[in-house]
Image: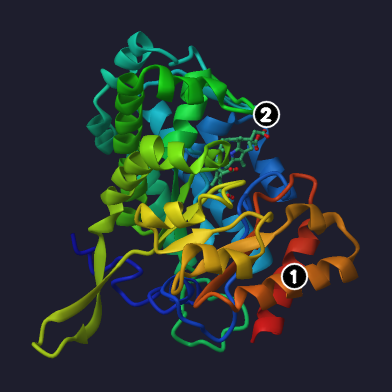
Amino acid sequence: MILPPQHPLSAGRTADSRLVRAYRGERADAVPVWFMRQAGRSLPEYRELRVGTRMLDACLDPAMAAEITLQPVRRHRVDAGIFFSDIVVPLKLVGVDVEIQAGRGPVFGRAFADAAAVADLTAIDPASLDAAAAPISDAVARTVAELDGIAPAGGADAAASATPLIGFAGAPFTLAAYLAEGGPSKDHLAARTLMHADPGAWRDLMHWTAELTGRFLRAQVVAGASAAQLFDSWAGALSLEDYERHVAPASARALSFVHDLAYETGATDASGAAVTRSVPVVHFGVGTGELLGAMRGVGADAVGVDYRVPLDVAAERVGAGVPLQGNLDPALLAAPWPVLEQAVLDVLRRGRSAPGHVFNLGHGVPPQTDPAVLTRVVELVHEASA
Ligand code: CP3
């Protein structure tokens, strides 16, 4: 599907932004930077806005979700907004009993760890998300309308007139890890058991989850997001063999919901036909050093790397021509500035091994982070890479 002419990519407002160019494997005037969990508890304005509102209620309030998404963009002048939501929001929207407990994470009314439970879950039609996703589309549209008026910092690049929004979804395995356990766990044992104990039930669970989360991602892109990130946060719990056999097909299925979304570049090819480009897709997981090549293989344009594998090593593992995102250890945000500064410069240096580099952390911003430090990191990344 060709995105509508008013979409920021189609309209040319974000198609040549630093972020989108880096995801295409190009180098712009500076390395783009954003932070996973930039929207959230490290910001006093977030904590203030959230008083008295539960996490999932905040996600489903379009005005509040848009405002929280914009807070870190205004404050840090990052090169992208990441939509404020959660990986379990599509489950909530189709009626699954789930809440997010502070300090713990998503907790379900029951666990889905055997064939009977999986049958109950998959009786819900994932296509019912399309109608239920209105608050998400509304929140994205509001966010994008504001981001159109915010040019990224240090704007030597006149083409980058608006700040792009990144949409995201949880990958089927990470969602299934919560669903099978009924809540957060360290080793995701219930999911890892189910995939071997009952491969049929596992396949049903993964297929259903892929259909649901893929639709959630698609809704955000159609409503105005300029890139899409699939979070397989807990895939690092798997061997490469289990990943390829029991997980990768479902992740590929989830991404198929955005692969057909394209925009016209305004150029024409030799035969006079309009040149189109697809929306860039990033795939990230924690502790996935062994899986980087396979994670690219499910249909990602760029790969997010956690802090355990240096970017120059990751570049070899994913193969030539793959843009990378990452990977400052979040722990360093609390280190003295000279230590942090050297670490940022080291990430930038190693990032040159990839055709495009988007600076990020190796995982989310810790809640106790001093926001002024994040702002300073953004400035350093822009200055040092210009
Ligand atoms: O700024 C951003 O990155 C965008 C917003 C975002 C949130 N969750 C907001 C959030 C994104 C992209 C997510 C994705 C998400 N949610 C993931 C994948 C990324 C990752 O961290 O690996 C996962 C695994 C979840 C599930 C989840 N939701 C967890 C583990 C938690 C933390 C629980 C806690 O309190 O420590 C949440 C809650 C959550 N999601 C918060 C935010 C801002 C904190 C809620 C609060 O403010 O009380």
Q: Is residue 203 above or below residue 325?
A: above
Q: Residue at x 89, y 71 (%)?
A: 338
Labelled pair 1, 2 in contact (Cβ < 8 Å): no
- Residue at left offset 8%, top offset 87%: 271
From the viewer's side, name the closer residue of 284 and 377. 284
Give the SS element for disc 1: helix
- Residue 385: tell me if it is visible: yes
**Vertical placement of residue 113 versus 260, above or below:** above
Nearer to us of marks 1 and 2 is 1
Please tell me in which quadrant of the rendered image residue 70 appears.
bottom right
Q: CA distance from mark 1 to mark 2?
A: 30 Å
Is the CB–ligand 1 distance for label 2 below 8 Å?
Answer: yes
- The image position of residue 265, as x and y in percent, is 27, 79
User: Residue 190: where, in percent of width, then height?
Assistant: 52, 20
Instruction: Residue at the far front: name it.
Output: 241
Along the horizontal axis of the image, is 46 left or right of 173? right
Residue 85, percent across and down? Answer: 50, 42
Query: Three-letter amino acid code at disc 1?
Result: Val
Relative to 142, is 346 on the left or the right? right
Image-quarter location of ligand 1? top right
Q: Residue at x 48, y 70 (%)?
A: 323
Q: Which mark is residue 102?
A: 2
Q: How is the image coloured?
A: rainbow
Foreground pick, 333 / 5: 333
Where, quadrant-wise, is the C terminus in this rendering? bottom right
**Up/down of 210 relative to 168, above or below:** above
Three-letter code, disc 2: Ala
Instruction: Return the disc, 1 or 2, that comes first in the chain's sequence.
Output: 2
Disc 1 target residue: 344
Q: Nearer the viewer, residue 293 or 234?
A: 293
- Dot 1: within a 10 Å radius of its alpha carbon, few (fewer than 14), some, or many (20 or more) residues? many
Q: Secondary structure at mark 2?
A: loop
